Amino acid sequence: MIETFFTVYPLQAKTYNPNTRKKVTFLVDPTYDGVAATAGSIIRYNPAWFDKHPGDIDVVTHEAMHIVQSYRRGGPGWVTEGIADYVRHTMGVDNPGAGWTLTPFSDKQNYDNAYRITARFFVWIEKNVKPGFVVKLNEAMREGKYNDGIWKEWTGKDVKELWSAYAANPVI
Ligand SMILES: [Zn+2]
């Protein structure tokens, strides 16, 4: 886990926030019953999860990205989690080893379902609509400049129109 951190964190910092924290603490906490969670500079891990899923090393990649994000000025939670899983998808060291993939598209989904569903939508936007979109979105979120109008401003379509275009041809 430490090795994964030192592989991905510098890359995340370079792309998404060169001013990210220089000191991060890993806490392996048997009293914590989620998978992992990040608050400030502390990432808390549930050892029981890693006992059962020893290959799920890129939980580190997802959580370390939350430190890099450092969103303290609001913005929707589904964007935060979508970006963290987008970064796990693009920068992860061994997602196949964990059997971790983006959730395949289905017409029951919506853009704000967060995590892997939103992450896949972001991959599609990067590929088909606007390369560099996630970097810009991350910056707007951190600077407290996110608003519902940015989708149209940056892509010519609002988020619902983008999702409809994605749903019509969700190939990535
Ligand atoms: Zn998260």
Image (tube, rainbow, N blue to C red):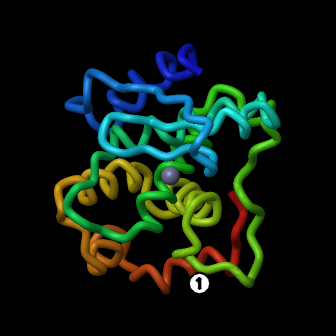
Residue at point 56%, 34% (across, down)? 29
Residue 146 placement (x, y as % from top left): 25, 68
- Determine the image quadrant of residue 106: bottom right
Whether the residue under disc 1 has CB within 8 Å of ligand 1: no
- Determine the image quadrant of residue 107: bottom right
Decide if residue 59 is in sight here. no
Relative to the observer, which residue lies in front, 119 or 24?
Answer: 24
Left or right, 49 with reference to 38 = right
Q: State whether residue 15 is above or below residue 160.
A: above
Task: Name the residue carrying label 1.
Answer: 164
Residue at point 33%, 28% (across, down)? 14
Residue 131 placement (x, y as % from top left): 44, 51
Relative to the observer, which residue lies in front, 11 or 170?
Answer: 11
- Determine the image quadrant of residue 92: top right
Residue at point 56%, 14% (across, down)? 3
Q: State whether residue 134 is above or below residue 38.
A: below
Relative to the observer, which residue lies in front, 39 or 125?
Answer: 39
Task: For mark 1, give the secondary structure.
Answer: helix
Mark 1 surroundings: few (<14), some (14-19) or many (≥20) residues within 10 A: few
Relative to the observer, which residue lies in front, 129 or 3?
Answer: 3
